Image: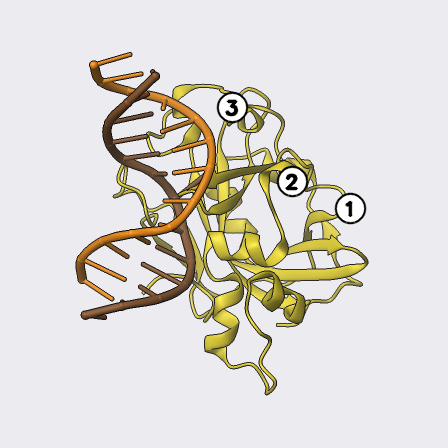
Chain colours: A yellow, B brown, C orange
DNA sequence: TTATAGATTGCCT
DNA sequence: GGCAATCTATAAT
């Protein structure tokens, strides 16, 4: 479904001031918007994972606050961006009130606008013909890919407030997913049995397999 | 001070 | 399906 900017508005802070499982589920279908040099880059969230904070051994917050994860212990609705495997940035949104460190990892988007810019940011040549699904999936399917496509980095974006109109925001345009699936989180070894990954059931931009 | 694993991706066989 | 790339946070020495 297309992005309708006229209906779109940021989610209120209370949206994020909840259990990360609820937030992850309810973020499906919302639109991540990046404004860069008057250009609009946008993608619909189709996959997200919940991280539960201090009681979750797989969470960065498990060992308590550090310089790296401090945003997680701050107020809800802020971007936590970290660098992983020497190559990739991952984007999270902080959840729960000040002092509690839950978050949601954004794992995949359906690209909506600024596709040509996304191809370039990913180091790919935009296809001359109409892009196929296999081309488009290289843009924002996967947590490291979507940050690169949107130019999201820790130095630039960590701790940004995602509930305000700015160069990085999450909007609700009224779209509601039909079918939502729950699965185990990907790429982790600890607490791997928990069903904390949420995906839009029939969406082709979901990662994995 | 040194070692190791990591919320990933892309290229190789 | 296997594995190297490449940096950093954290654990081990």
Chain assignment, label 3: A
Chain assignment, label 2: A
Which of pointers 2 and 3 indicates the residue nearer the eye? 2
The image shows residue A143 at horizontal and vertical percentages of 47, 52
Mark 2 and mark 1 in contact? Answer it, CB < 8 Å. no
The image shows residue A21 at horizontal and vertical percentages of 45, 42
SS for dot 1: loop
The image shows residue A11 at horizontal and vertical percentages of 68, 46
The residue labelled by disc 1 is A165
The number of callouts visible is 3
- Spatial separation of the CA atoms under disc 3 and disc 1: 25 Å
Mark 2 and mark 3 in contact? Answer it, CB < 8 Å. no
Residue pictured at 66% horizontal, 61% vertical: A42
A168 sits left or right of A29 in the view = right
The residue labelled by disc 3 is A100
Which of pointers 3 and 1 indicates the residue nearer the eye? 1
| Residue A11 visible from this viewpoint | yes
Chain assignment, label 1: A
Q: Which mark is residue A63?
A: none
Residue pictured at 69% horizontal, 48% vertical: A169
SS for dot 3: loop
Q: Nearer the viewer, residue A94 or A87?
A: A87
The residue labelled by disc 2 is A157
- Pointer 2 or 1: first along the chain: 2
SS for dot 2: helix
Quarter holding the C terminus of chain A is bottom left
Which of pointers 2 and 1 indicates the residue nearer the eye? 2
Residue pictured at 45% horizontal, 71% vertical: A204
- Spatial separation of the CA atoms under disc 2 and disc 3: 21 Å
């Amino acid at each position: 479904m297309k992005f309708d900017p006229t209906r779109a508005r940021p989610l209120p802070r209370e949206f994020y001031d909840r259990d990360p499982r609820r937030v992850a589920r309810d973020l499906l279908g919302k639109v991540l918007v990046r404004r860069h040099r008057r250009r609009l880059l946008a993608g619909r969230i189709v996959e997200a994972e919940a991280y539960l904070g201090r009681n979750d051994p797989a969470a960065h917050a498990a060992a308590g606050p550090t310089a790296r994860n401090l945003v997680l212990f701050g107020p809800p609705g802020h971007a936590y961006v970290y660098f992983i495997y020497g190559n990739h940035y991952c984007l999270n949104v902080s959840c729960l009130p000040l002092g509690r460190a839950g978050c949601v990892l954004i794992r995949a988007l359906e690209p909506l606008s600024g596709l040509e810019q996304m191809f370039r940011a990913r180091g790919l040549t935009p296809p001359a013909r109409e892009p196929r699904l296999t081309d488009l999936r290289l843009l924002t399917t996967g947590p490291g890919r979507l940050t690169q496509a949107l130019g999201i980095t820790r130095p630039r974006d960590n701790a940004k407030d995602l509930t305000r109109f700015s160069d990085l925001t999450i909007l609700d345009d009224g779209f509601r997913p039909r079918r939502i699936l729950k699965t185990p989180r990907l790429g982790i070894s600890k607490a791997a049995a928990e069903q904390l990954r949420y995906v839009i059931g029939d969406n082709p931009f979901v990662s994995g397999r």
